[in-house]
Image (tube, helix red, strand yellow):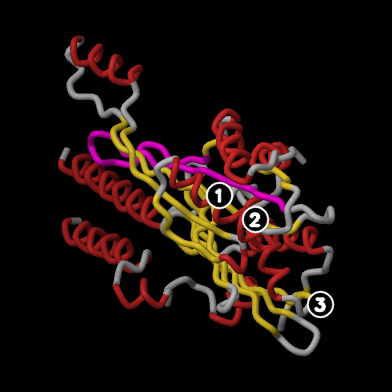
């Protein structure tokens, strides 16, 4: 019985440590999220039928403001915008807008909820629904 | 007797282990965190004014000056996209909370943590209006409050109407124009 308890304690401790990825490599590389890079990227990315990067970035900023984000940074050359929403919790989001081809832009968003990456598709779908309405353009899935 | 004691010890270990696992990995963004809500439109009205000018750069620099008047330091700016961001750290002591803490201490409740310090952030964005010859300004404020134990006690958007009205009346004076509500 004593041996059993020791083993159980050891395995629970291991689970606690491993399950939440407290090691530096996993945290820096987000290597332990349980989702592949391709899956994560496609969930966070949409294509839009426009080539106006500036207008798209300005609409991204307006959409973030509509969703109660305060803009932290914006850079037209880099095509990126970051914002933070505080409402008893913190959501931080970075959105980048880059040309995809002659007729399309690609928009990518990644977000963090408190100290964790957001890996469910729903919040990204909600964001792109709002952006799509503001742009009067369809958000097209990529890949 | 020995068996009972061991099995209750076991239960404690399992519960502790499970709670550690759950709290460590607890994830859960509120379902509607990134959806437009009914009050999104009201907030937009409160935070936005339209000015009869096409000079976005002038509007932006006047706005930056108003933020400076209000004691903000500018953290970021991108003129090409019409963005300025500022912040300031201020005292967050609230008279009511101090009174409550004194009351608790008098009752022998010990040292109650009260709000002590806050960081206020402001972010202001200009953009051309769909109506010709005018530009839109939208400002948003938020704050993080720490208590006397240096723990974050509040993390919120600032929605008081008077704050926005006051900000825009200052901006009106700075650009010599009167901002119109949408």
Magenta residues, as a range? B135-157
Give the letter of the chain under mark 3.
A
| Location of residue B57 with respect to B67 vertically, above or below | below
Q: Does label 2 or label 1 sit earlier along the sequence?
A: 1
Q: Quadrant of residue B81?
A: bottom right
Label the magenta part by its dominant secondary structure.
strand
Magenta span contains residue B151: yes
Q: Residues within 10 Å of mark 2 (few under 14, many from 20)?
A: many
Q: Residues within 10 Å of mark 3 (few under 14, many from 20)?
A: some
Asked whether the beta carbons under mark 2 and mark 1 sit within 8 Å of each other, the answer is yes
Q: Residue at x 61, y 69 (%)?
A: B80
Magenta span contains residue B15: no
Q: Secondary structure at mark 3?
A: loop
Give the letter of the chain under mark 2.
B
* Mark whose residue sits in front, 1 or 3: 1
Q: Which residue is mark 1?
A: B63
In-front residue for pair A13/A21: A21
Q: Which residue is mark 3?
A: A49
Q: CA distance from mark 2 to mark 1?
A: 9 Å
Q: Residues within 10 Å of mark 1 (few under 14, many from 20)?
A: many
Lateral position of residue B180 relative to residue B95, left or right: right
Q: Which residue is mark 2?
A: B126
Lateral position of residue A31 relative to residue B95, left or right: right
Q: CA distance from mark 2 to mark 3?
A: 25 Å
């Amino acid at each position: 019985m004593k041996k059993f308890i020791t083993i159980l304690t050891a395995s629970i401790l291991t689970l606690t440590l491993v399950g939440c990825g407290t090691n530096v490599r996993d945290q820096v590389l987000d290597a332990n999220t349980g989702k592949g890079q391709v899956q994560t990227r496609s969930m966070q990315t949409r294509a839009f039928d426009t080539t106006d990067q500036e207008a798209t970035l300005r609409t991204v900023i307006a959409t973030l403001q509509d969703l109660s984000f305060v803009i932290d940074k914006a850079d037209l050359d880099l095509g990126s915008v970051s914002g933070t929403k505080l409402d008893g919790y913190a959501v931080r989001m970075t959105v980048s807008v880059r040309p995809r081809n002659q007729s399309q832009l690609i928009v990518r968003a990644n977000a963090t909820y408190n100290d964790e990456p957001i890996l469910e598709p729903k919040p990204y779908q909600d964001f792109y629904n709002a952006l799509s309405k503001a742009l009067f353009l369809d958000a097209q899935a990529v890949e | 007797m020995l068996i009972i004691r061991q099995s209750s010890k076991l239960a404690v270990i399992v519960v502790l282990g499970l709670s550690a696992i759950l709290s460590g990995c607890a994830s859960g963004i509120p379902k509607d965190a990134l959806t437009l809500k009914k009050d999104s439109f009201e907030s937009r009205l409160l935070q936005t004014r339209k000015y009869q000018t096409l000079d976005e750069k002038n509007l932006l620099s006047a706005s930056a000056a108003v933020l400076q008047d209000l004691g903000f330091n500018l953290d970021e700016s991108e003129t090409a996209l019409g963005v300025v961001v500022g912040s300031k750290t201020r005292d967050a002591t609230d008279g009511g909370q101090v009174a409550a803490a004194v009351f608790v201490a008098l009752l022998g409740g010990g040292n109650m943590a009260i709000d002590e310090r806050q960081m206020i952030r402001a972010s202001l964005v200009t953009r051309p209006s769909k109506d010709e010859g005018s530009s839109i300004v939208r400002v948003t404020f938020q704050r993080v409050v720490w208590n006397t134990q240096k723990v974050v006690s509040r993390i919120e958007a600032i929605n008081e109407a008077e704050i926005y009205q006051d900000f825009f009346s200052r901006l009106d004076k700075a650009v010599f124009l009167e901002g119109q509500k949408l």
